Image (cartoon, rainbow, N blue to C red):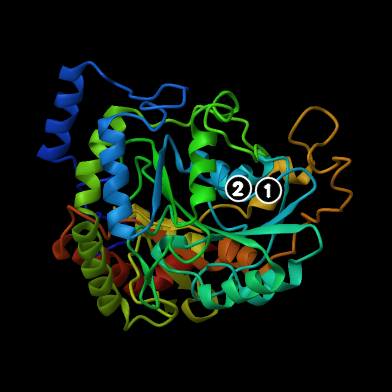
Amino acid sequence: MGKLAISGGSKVRERPFVSHAIIEEEERKRVNEVLDSGMLSGFIANAGEHFLGGKQVKEFETLAKDYFKTKFAVAVNSATAGLHAALGACGVGPGDEVIVTPYTMSASATAIIMMNAVPVFADVEEETFCLEPQKVKEKITPKTKAIVIVHLFGHAANMDAIMKIAEEHKLSVIEDCAQSPGAAYKGKLVGTIGDIGVFSLNQHKTITSGEGGFAITNDEKLGLKMQLIRNHGEVIVDNMEVENIDGIVGFNYRMTELEAAVSIGQFRRLDSLNDHRIKLAEYLTEKLSNFEGLILPKKSNVDKHVYFVYPIRFKEDVIGVDRNTFVNALKAEGIPFGAGYVRPIYLEPMYQRKTAYGINGCPFTCGYYGGEANYSKGICPVCERMHEKELMLTGVCKSPHTKEDIDDVVKAFEKVFQNIDELKSIEK
């Protein structure tokens, strides 16, 4: 197939893969309706008709409630806001610990810091990249208040085991479903298994409004509390006769009518967008299955894996070059792949220096805490190995790409494998 592009040869693929969301007519029509109305936000920080937002926000929340069959859907301006509101609703506060994966977007843990609580990181499973239940159990202390589960890359975590641990220790469970809307675990949609599910509508997600998110729950108290945290609850609780005001320092986490208008059109296509991802991902798995040294994604805990990204575990000892060199060769051929995902969160400066608020190290040194958070390298060895040596990712399995686009990915793998000796010489 010719000389490797990384060595100056021709690329397998010259044209770029589509990276942005696909906007269709319903979104355009609804946005124009909002613009024509002049009502760009329907929220007012008062008890009454406008406490819950405008027409588009309410319609979007109804769509989400119907899809997930929950009593509450709370639209917010980001999934970070949704996580913050969820933690507040569950009563997380100063002195508490919350167990979370280190292999996720930073906000899954930062939202815990935002509640003046302390993140405790547990290691991940090799096959799913989600929290490993036994490692979660080992991290529980008398200070543990909740668990934040992340259904990473579109694959559900081992929720039976997690929920059993949570029940035994009376812990709240918040599901971070930013990468997995529509994924299912043993017949249940992710987000509906724990106490609260949080979803993202960020620009890069399966469905998007640019920014935005929402949270779902079947618990009336949790639903109301998230609504209060979303919309300046501290000045509303009196008129709404809310007795328990702990944690209701209201923020402006309100979704605009424009965001909701786009979200409605996007949400209506969620299942079809996921079905397309699944079709392309399963096709890619079939085509790559003959290459030794690649561990392809498995649906070990799920009824439905929605492949937000396509993860591969790379075995250097089998292939003979390191993961980063291999990924660079694929990228040179015009195929977008990432080496690793994110650096384990606890290795970021905020955790290494143990300081978030002010100069005194809060919440890690908070007088209410009194614990000793361990963020040293090596605490989550599986996660570190995935990031440093094994995991490689691509986001090409999505609309509007086709099997012909995936064929280019396969051709690039074939070319690199056929020229592996050349790649070894480059690595040296």
Q: Nearer the viewer, residue 143 or 362?
A: 143
Residue 212, x across and y down, in percent: 39, 38
Secondary structure under the numbered disc 2 in the rendered image: helix
Q: Determine if residue 17 is in view.
A: no
Which amino acid is tagged 1?
Val
Above-or-below relation of 157 to 11: below
Residue 125 image offset from top left, x and y in percent: 57, 73
* Residue 87 - label: 2
What's under tag 2, amino acid-wise? Leu
Rendered-image quadrant of the N terminus: bottom left
Label of residue 92 in the image: 1
Q: Which mark is on residue 311?
A: none
Q: Quick one: SS at disc 1?
A: loop
Foreground pick, 298 / 215: 215
Quarter of the figure with residue 19: top left
Q: Tell me the quarter of the picture where residue 399 sits.
A: bottom left
Q: Identify the residue at horizontal 80%, vertical 56% (top origin).
A: 374
Mark 2 in CB contact with mark 1 (< 8 angstroms): yes
Q: In this rendering, does residue 153 appear at all?
A: yes
Quadrant the C terminus occupies: bottom right
* Residue 289, image x, y percentages: 32, 81
Give the residue at x 43% y 63%.
192
Q: Earlier in the sequence, mark 2 or mark 1?
A: 2
| Picture quadrant of residue 271 | bottom left
